[in-house]
Image (spheres, rainbow, N blue to C red):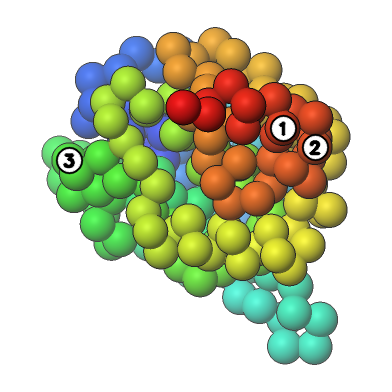
């Protein structure tokens, strides 16, 4: 069983931002191994666990694939799944890094995107998860003060997702949770700007979209 600091923890470490709890990837194990080691299963996801003392989040490494019959994005766990497999499931390249000792595992160029201030999707599977629209918008608000912007290709993919009806599959709870998170950032307006530009905000709330457009004229 191996443990790798990863995701948001590496992003915050490289940007020298404070963080309360760490995020880890576990490889060389299955869910039963992790439960036997004393970790608490997170009820919302059978592959996510919480350390009982630190409260850190531990993600059992997953390999993703699209089911040929249903077209649904599926995940496989197991002792043979690698840390790189798990990083390929992440939404943004800046969240698709892990640390092995002093070395950064960075198969998708996240470190360069951090340097250049770019929010870029990792793989085309991005479009299979509707709530990724919210994730990009939340990180836009969190990092707006550092000049981060959404990559052109990612913005184009988000527009295609909205046109294909992705917003209909985002729950009100997910939306309200995202809004609460961005209100704690220094630039909440960046969240609404990203959703407005891709067309999602109009579908989430036509009134809010109209208000945003009115406030940003001129």
Which residue appears farthest toward the bottom when viewing the image? Answer: 69
According to the picture, the residue beneath numbered tag 2 turns out to be 206
Residue in view at x 53 percent, y 20 percent: 188
- Taking the spot 61% from the left edge, 67% from the top edge, the residue there is 160
What is the CA distance from the residue labelled 3 to the residue labelled 1?
A: 34 Å
Please identify the quarter of the rendering in which residue 165 is found. bottom right
Callout 2 touching callout 1 (CB < 8 Å): yes
Number of the front mark, 3 or 1: 1
Mark 3, Cα crowd under 10 Å, few <14 / some 14-19 / many 20+, is few
**How far across and down, in percent of the image, does residue 78 sit?**
58, 64
On the question of residue 146 being in view, the answer is yes
As drawn, the label of residue 154 is: none
Q: Please, what secondary structure does the residue beneath circle 3 have?
A: helix
Q: Which residue is mark 1?
A: 210
- Relative to residue 197, is residue 177 depicted above or below? above
Q: In the rendering, at what x and y percent does residue 15 appear?
A: 24, 26
Crowding at mark 1 (Cα within 10 Å: few <14, some 14-19, many 20+): some
Secondary structure of the residue carrying tag 1 is: helix
Callout 2: SS: helix
Name the spot of residue 71 as percent of width and height, x first: 75, 79
Is 118 or 45 nearer to us in this picture? 118
Task: Measuring from the top left, give residue 186's x and y in whole percent.
Answer: 44, 12
Left or right for 40, reference 118:
right
Say which residue appears at 59% left-offset and 14% top-offset.
183
Q: Give the number of the disc on residue 115.
A: 3
Mark 2 vs 3: CB contact within 8 A: no
N-term-proximal mark, 3 vs 1: 3
């Amino acid at each position: 069983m191996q443990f790798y600091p990863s995701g948001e923890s590496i992003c915050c470490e490289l940007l020298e931002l404070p963080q309360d709890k760490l995020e880890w990837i576990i490889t060389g194990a299955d869910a039963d191994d992790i439960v036997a080691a004393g970790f608490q299963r997170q009820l919302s996801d059978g592959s996510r666990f919480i350390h009982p003392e630190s409260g850190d989040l531990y993600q059992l490494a997953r390999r993703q694939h699209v089911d040929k019959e249903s077209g649904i994005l599926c995940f496989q766990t197991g002792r043979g799944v690698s840390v790189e497999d798990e990083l390929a499931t992440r939404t943004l390249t800046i969240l698709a890094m892990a640390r092995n000792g002093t070395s950064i595992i960075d198969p998708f160029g996240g470190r360069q995107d951090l340097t250049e201030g770019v929010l870029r999707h990792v793989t085309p599977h991005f479009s299979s998860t509707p709530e990724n629209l919210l994730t990009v918008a939340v990180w836009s608000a969190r990092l707006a003060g550092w000049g981060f912007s959404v990559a052109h290709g990612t913005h184009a993919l988000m527009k295609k997702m909205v046109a294909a009806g992705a917003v209909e599959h985002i729950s009100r709870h997910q939306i309200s949770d995202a809004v609460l998170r961005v209100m704690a950032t220094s630039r909440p307006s960046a969240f609404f700007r990203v959703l407005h530009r891709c067309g999602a905000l109009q579908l989430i709330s036509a009134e809010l979209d109209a208000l945003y457009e009115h406030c940003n004229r001129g």
